[in-house]
Image: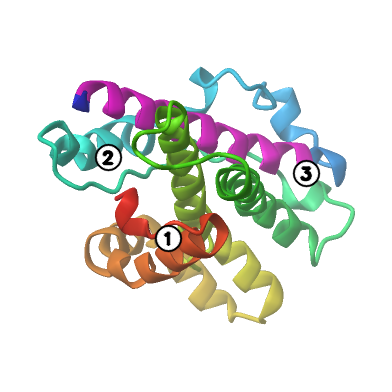
Amino acid sequence: MEIVTFIIFIAILIFSVVLHEVAHGVTANYLGDPTAKMMGRLTLNPIPHLDMFGSIILPLLLAIPMLFGAPSVIFGWAKPVPYNPYNLRNKKWGPAMVGGAGPATNLFLALVFGLALRFIMPVSADSSLFGLAVVFMAITYINLLLAVFNLVPIPPLDGSKLLFSLFNVPHHIRTMLERNGFIFLLLFIFLGFQMILPIIQGAFSLITGVGPGAFI
């Protein structure tokens, strides 16, 4: 059963990160930059979007406890969709809109499946729809996780684009953050990730009416 759960979770994660990245590309294209479209990144085919570490290695490492029946939080990311901010019609807010499109898509998915779970689908263990309810819980939780995680203001996460649009960050600080972003990101994943879990769990309970302990 753990193997089946593992496969389902990985499939949901890939589905969610692909939609996240496509949302960036679609928004950039709408705002005047066709880079993602020209590079074939406006597709739901997951292969062009997969990142070796973020889409495969990290989720597999995080999922190891699940294979032994232990609680596990799985997350990851896809290759960032390329775009040229100089092509955007709105130079100030365009990058923030492109950056915010990914988390907004994940939040939308979490709301759709979470509210369906709350108002339409029973979650009692003896229900014939319990298996489907668990899938809906997984979709909701993973997409909330992706939305909140990507809003952390560390390059190359989407939150950094919002930060740079909202505040006049000095050029040397911005350059330093972008140059060392992956190091800061790894430090956050392994040392600071616990800080955002209460936000994710609180939003999950608020949307679904189910305590996070029923899923994690």
Nearer to us: label 1 or label 3: 3
State the residue in front, 118 or 170.
Answer: 118
- Label 1 crowding class (10 Å Cα cut-off): few <14, some 14-19, many 20+? few
Q: Which residues are magenta?
A: 3-27
Q: Which residue is mark 1?
A: 179
Q: Position of residue 43 (x, y in %)?
A: 66, 22
Q: State how far apart marks 3 and 2 are (Cα).
A: 28 Å
At 57% from the left edge and 50% from the top edge, which residue is drawn?
118
Q: Position of residue 152 (x, y in %)?
A: 48, 66
State the residue in front, 38 or 110.
Answer: 110
**Apparent side of residue 178 relative to residue 23 in the rendered image (left or right):** left
Q: Name the quarter where the N terminus is drawn.
A: top left
- Label 3 crowding class (10 Å Cα cut-off): few <14, some 14-19, many 20+? many
Q: Which residue is mark 3?
A: 27
Residue type highlighted by circle 2:
Leu
Q: Is residue 199 above or below residue 59?
A: below
What is the number of the mark on residue 58?
Answer: 2
